[in-house]
Amino acid sequence: MSNKKIILCASDSWYLLNFRYDLIKELNEKYSEVVIVTSFDGSEKKMGEFFPNIRIINSLLDRKSTGLMKNVFLIYCYFKIYINEKPDFVMNFTIKPNVFSAFVCIVLSIPFINNVTGLGTVFIKGGALQNIVIYLYRVIFPFAKNIIFQNNDDMSLIKDFKVSARNFVLIEGSGVNTNVFSSNESILEREYDFVFIGRIIKDKGVVEYIKAMKRLKLEYPSLRVLIVGGLDSDNQTSLSKEEFNELIEDSGIEYLGKRSDVPKILSETKFMVLPSYREGLSKVLIEAASMGCVILTSDVPGCRQVVESNGFLFEPKNVESLYNTVLNTIEIGDEELLRLSKNSRKLAVSRFSTEIVNKKIFNLLQD
């Protein structure tokens, strides 16, 4: 065991619990002290139950705010925490920690790694905010030990913006626990035909999904079509409860809300559908692949990487393309469906398992 103290810093505790649980578990076994610095959103309570010996410190980060004073206050909070904790190393996740926590690390001479977990709404929309983020990346990133990207498209795009690339590393995704996400149920026997799992925000393509599936349900009313996920009012592209209810009304789509039994739902899913506009590397797609689901997703960074011989791509932000892709899958025979399902599982185990991903991260920490 290393006698070093490591801090994991992220925008919210939900992200760390859902995307980095296995990494935290392994760090907790290999480092003498692990400290988590994040905003509190309720998930920190569950994380505290899983890891009672890990201290979780509230960074008071406001995900919605782009105001100067709130960001200055966040920098002050990071300074206060890091001076008090004296970490040997910091790992940053998500956009604000990649800038503001990293800045504090530079000033205090603390080694750090940044994880670019996706370029998100800022880069989907473009504009002034994107220009500010790019400028900050140019200033901050050269000081990092490494900058981890989840897909080559994001890495190439940041390089194109003249950000120093000497320390860039590709590690595909946050990994999937292929033991937890494993199903013995044949895809032919599964209950749900088409499932969307994700936050109810426009950038995930949920509006296109609902519109396409409404048409499909008119032609094939017996199909089971699901949406699983909660509203996210903190996101810039969120749908209000009223907007979502109006969209889904009389659609024939079953809405299950936010669920904690995602492995169980995926074990009963034939086709996982994600019409996202952009991802780092979609966690839910690699979880679905690990469960042997056939993948239907947008031809965009962070999604297309999870489709080889195990699914089909459609055009992003295009209801017609999504609808036609889904319609074509209905005619797939049993033998082909079994082949696609087997290929999904094989891809998840060979490329996206937490063992593979976390080993690469630990190699960087030890270099």
Image: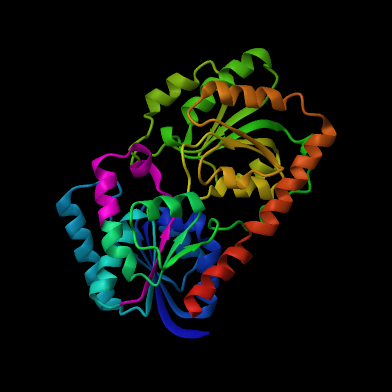
Question: In screen coordinates, is 83 left or right of 156?
Answer: left
- Residue 325: image quadrant is top right
Which of 170/198 is in front?
170
Q: Residue 141: x, y in percent?
A: 33, 64
Q: Residue 162: x, y in percent?
A: 33, 56
**Residue appearing at x 45%, y 35% in the figure:** 200
Question: In screen coordinates, is 234 left or right of 208?
Answer: left
**Residue appearing at x 29%, y 72% in the figure:** 105
Q: Residue 365: x, y in percent?
A: 48, 76
Q: Residue 220: x, y in percent?
A: 69, 16
Would you say residue 116 sits in the magenta stretch?
yes
Which of 254/182 is in front?
182
Question: In screen coordinates, is 4 left or right of 309?
Answer: left
**Residue appearing at x 58%, y 63% in the figure:** 357
In this rendering, is residue 128 above or below 134? above
The magenta stretch is 110-135
Would you say residue 133 sits in the magenta stretch?
yes
Identity of the residue furthest to the left in this view: 69
Labels in figure, total? 0
